[in-house]
Image: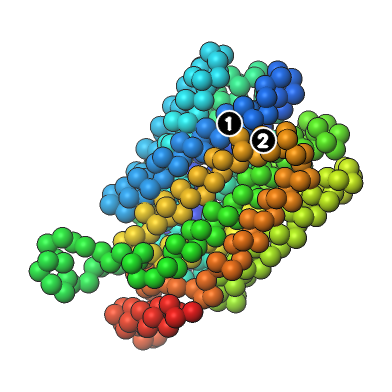
Amino acid sequence: MPQEATSTRAWTMLALGVLAQAAGTMLVSAPVYLIPLLHIEQGMPLATAGLLASAPTLGMVLTLVLWGAAADRYGERWVIACGLAATAVCAFAASTLSSGGLVPLAVALLLGGAMAASSNAASGRVVVGWFPRHRRGLAMGVRQMSQPLGVAAAAVVVPPLASGGGPVAVFAVIGALLSVVTVGCALGIRNPPRPPREPARSASASSSHSIPNPYRESGFLVRIHTVSLLLVLPQFAIATFGMVWLITELDWGQTAAGLLMGLSQFAGALGRIVAGSLSDRVGDRVRVLRWVAASGVALMLILAAVGVLHAPVLGGIVLVMATIVSVADNGLAYTSVAEAAGSGWAGRALGIQNTGQFVAASAVGPGLGAAIALLGYPAVFALVALAPLVSFPLIPRRDRHRDALVDPSPAPVGAPAAPVHSTRRQDQAEGRSRSTH
């Protein structure tokens, strides 16, 4: 296949992966932007509204690893398409059940999050499979735009829809959008080429078709999972309560606050691309990850100080900056996990990665909602700054990767082909060296 055709297909898969996860993220994020309606206008306690907003995230926690294992075994195309179709059904169910009380709506949202997890686990696998390593940081940064873009779309669309038609209109529109995206992904996504498996070294290995478990080789993956779990706390604290903070503490209007949240998420999406491209340039994902963690500590403390000063304009500016930094780590960590796991484990490892993040995110809504009611926003923002501070010493000193995720693009004409086994041995040697750090 010509190199240009391969490049075009890779970017097409990237675009569809972004679209798939962004559409699912709209459903997951929509309850967050119903909080002003539920809390301010209808009097629902903030902790209860936060619990409802966490329902889709909890649903994702329950199924992320299962969707990742399905992608490892059956391929990414139909995992994404079938998962999005089921998400659309849940969105329409939420629209129908939203007038029936809090519990039916929460159940529909929990199931919707469980189905939306399909695109989280499989779309990243599509992107990593189609791009060579020296372009994966940029490509995964673009792919990681999908979450802030989905959040931004929800921030802009949900408040006016909720004002006019309530949750019924919100989830009906999201269900229609998911239906359209489902068709596009079913028709357009193609599974990435996979490397041939090495001949088994023993009869027992051949009979079991075993694939080496990367978690047994080193602690790299566990450390990245732990770091990501900590770094997701500022992200979801801002995404969940940033709009309410602007309205109730800094006297912003609901429409203006929603637009600023949408702008901050879009800026965060661009920040992920910059972080990913920077990691390609310096050739080290974890070094950039350390920079992001240090910046996160500083900006959460500044956000707390702004809350004490009660400065509306400065608060909006710092909120945008904090949002950019709080989401910048996701693509770096996601790419590191996929590269360290290899194609045989990438789906499951990415599922575990997202599960840890969403477990933490599920606790943000009710936990921080109760803490804010008790301590106030400035104190809680300062406490959240401890998460990136604790993560800093846990970040590995060097990247770890294997060549099981092959470069789908052929070598330039006339260039000697690199033997796969030689490259794999080199990676294993690097891994042994890095495990001593």
Amino acid under label 1?
A: Leu
Instruction: Count the labels in the image.
Output: 2
Residue 240 in percent (x, y) is at 66, 39
Which of marks 2 and 1 precedes in the sequence?
1
In the displayed structure, does residue 202 sit left or right of residue 299?
Answer: left
* Residue 117: assigned label: none
**View extreme (left): residue:** 203
Q: Are marks 1 and 2 in contact (CB under 8 Å)?
A: yes
- Can residue 120 be seen here? The reply is yes
In the displayed structure, does residue 221 sit left or right of residue 244?
Answer: left
Q: Which residue is mark 2?
A: 369
Q: Eyeballing the image, is 119 above or below 175?
A: below
Residue appearing at x 55%, y 19% in the figure: 102
Residue in front for this viewpoint, 200 or 177? 200
Give the image's coloring scheme: rainbow
Residue in front for this viewpoint, 146 or 206? 206
Specify the quadrant of the image occupied by residue 289: bottom right
Q: Eyeballing the image, is 157 above or below 379?
A: above
Residue 304 in percent (x, y) is at 79, 49
Residue appearing at x 31%, y 61% in the figure: 344
In the displayed structure, does residue 159 sit left or right of residue 73?
Answer: right
Kind of element beneath mark 1: helix
Q: Which residue is mark 1?
A: 51
Q: Crowding near pointer 2: few (<14 within 10 Å), some, many (20+)?
A: many
Q: Crowding near pointer 1: few (<14 within 10 Å), some, many (20+)?
A: many
Residue 437 in percent (x, y) is at 49, 79
Amino acid under label 2?
A: Gly
